[in-house]
Amino acid sequence: MNALERLARTSFPELVLAGCALAFAGVLYELIGYQHYEKGTQIIGFVATIAGLIFTLLGFVRAAAVRTTTLIVLPLLAVVGVVGVFEHSETRREDAAKFAARQAQVTTTGTVAGATPSEPAAPAGAPAGGPQGGPPGGGPFRSNIPVLAPLAVSGLSALAFLTVLARRRDLGADAVHSREWPTTT
């Protein structure tokens, strides 16, 4: 058995928790990049991601009270992620309808409502979009809706929950060096 296989056998739950923690940190980085904490309900996903990171890290703690709290909070975060998926889906549909209405207006009138002199409207017959190929009215298209973030929060919370649940509760000093998963012969 090589060193990598031994590490995987003896520390599999810890490796999964570490991966979940890194993934939560990545989602948090994405949310900060999108500034997905500034308006209304956006803060829910931001706080849920921070909580997911914290409770995943607490999954390393073997104390009974911490373990119990972690096993209660992580499934709740998974539900928050599912709600976020529906919220984002609805918002994306609304944004798509607004974008389609703006494109239709450019096609029929040759101007964009709300276009300013610094943002010239696309002439009639020109391809819809601004100078960088964004939506009519100029400027690059930028959606502030992180597509995978709520699904990631849900999936990572569920995976961390299952990992903490499967992780052995306590290991005595004698068992630390022999904590291999049971094998069948």
Image: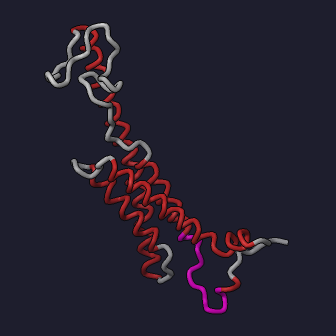
Q: Position of residue 154 (x, y in %)?
A: 45, 54
Q: Position of residue 34 (x, y in %)?
A: 32, 46
Which quadrant holds the N terminus?
bottom right
Vertical side of 12 occupied by 138: above or below: above
Q: Which residues are magenta?
A: 164-176
Q: Residue at x 59, y 78 (%)?
A: 168
Vertical side of 25 occupied by 7: above or below: below
Vertical side of 18 occupied by 172: above or below: below
Classify residue 113 as left or right of residue 95: left
Q: Nearer the viewer, residue 168 or 143?
A: 143
Q: How is the image coloured?
A: secondary structure
| Residue 175 inside the magenta-drawn segment | yes
Is residue 94 visible in this depiction of the protein? no
Classify residue 3 as left or right of residue 127: right
Type of secondary structure dominating the magenta stretch: loop
Vertical side of 154 occupied by 142: above or below: above
| Residue 173 inside the magenta-drawn segment | yes
Classify residue 120 as left or right of residue 75: left
Q: Nearer the viewer, residue 182 or 22?
A: 22
Number of dots carrying numbers? 0
Q: Position of residue 5 (x, y in %)?
A: 73, 69
